Amino acid sequence: MTTTPITPVLSADEAQALAGILAAHAGRPGALLPILHDVQHAFGHIPRASLAVIGRALNLSRAEVHGVVTYYDHFRTEPAGRHVIQVCRAEACQARGSEALWTHACRRTGCDEDRPTSADGQWTLEPVYCLGLCASGPSVQIGERLHARMNPASLDAKLAALDVAATAQGTEVSA
């Protein structure tokens, strides 16, 4: 028995949003990266089903678009968790203990490089290779906020504050 691969499909709302993004960049040279940034901003990730559509709009193959998406660490092809935590693992932060912080963050969130989003969808843990706070590492970005001189206890405090605030308010907050 042969099986046919399942082709991902965009919902009508996703297709309409993608069409708007593509129209906004129509005819612009070098539009692939701006389009990918806009798609990720709109959806929180770059849906696999959008790759072929983007490729057709830019006269590129799906493989070429996929290659760009997977080359850059910033892009993700799966939805992120409710809270995205980025731990700097560049040399300056490593010298200040970021590897131990990374290991702790993996245990705390239930994530790792092979499984970046927790099973409950609460956390996405991503390694990054510079947050621009080299003199005050190790650094972490939680959502849009940068934090310097982090350690396991300070990370736990930030994440616990997110849990408490989200539970109390029923909304997403930033640490």
Image (spheres, grey):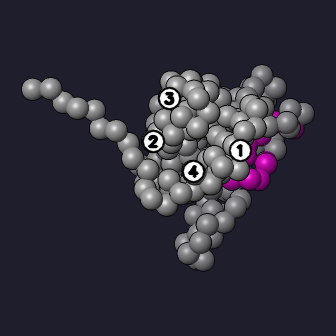
Which mark sits nearer the N-terminus, 1 or 2? 1
**Residue 25 has which mark?**
1
Q: Is 130 on the left or on the right of 161, as rendered?
A: right
- Which residue is under mark 3? 62
Q: Residues within 10 Å of mark 1 (few under 14, many from 20)?
A: some
**Residue 175 has which mark?**
none
**Residue type beneath disc 2:** Ala
* Label 2 with label 3: CB-CB less than 8 Å: no
Real-space CA distance between mark 2 and mark 3, rounded to the nearest whole angstrom? 10 Å
Q: Where's residue 132, x and y in %?
A: 85, 36
Mark count: 4
Which mark sits nearer the N-terminus, 1 or 3? 1
- Which residue is under mark 4? 18
Which mark sits nearer the N-terminus, 2 or 3? 2
Q: Residues within 10 Å of mark 2 (few under 14, many from 20)?
A: some
Q: Secondary structure at mark 4?
A: helix
Q: Is 116 on the left or on the right of 147, as rendered?
A: left
Real-space CA distance between mark 1 and mark 2, rounded to the nearest whole angstrom? 19 Å
Q: Where's residue 45, x and y in %?
A: 56, 46
- Which residue is under mark 2? 49
Q: Give the residue at the far front of this rendering.
A: 27
Q: Nearer the viewer, residue 150 or 48?
A: 48
Q: Where's residue 119, x and y in %?
A: 41, 49
Instruction: Let me know if residue 145 is in the magenta part.
Output: yes
Instruction: Let me know if residue 96 is in the magenta part.
Output: no
At horizontal 45% and vertical 42% (from top left) the residue drawn is: 49
At horizontal 34% and vertical 38% (from top left) the residue drawn is: 7
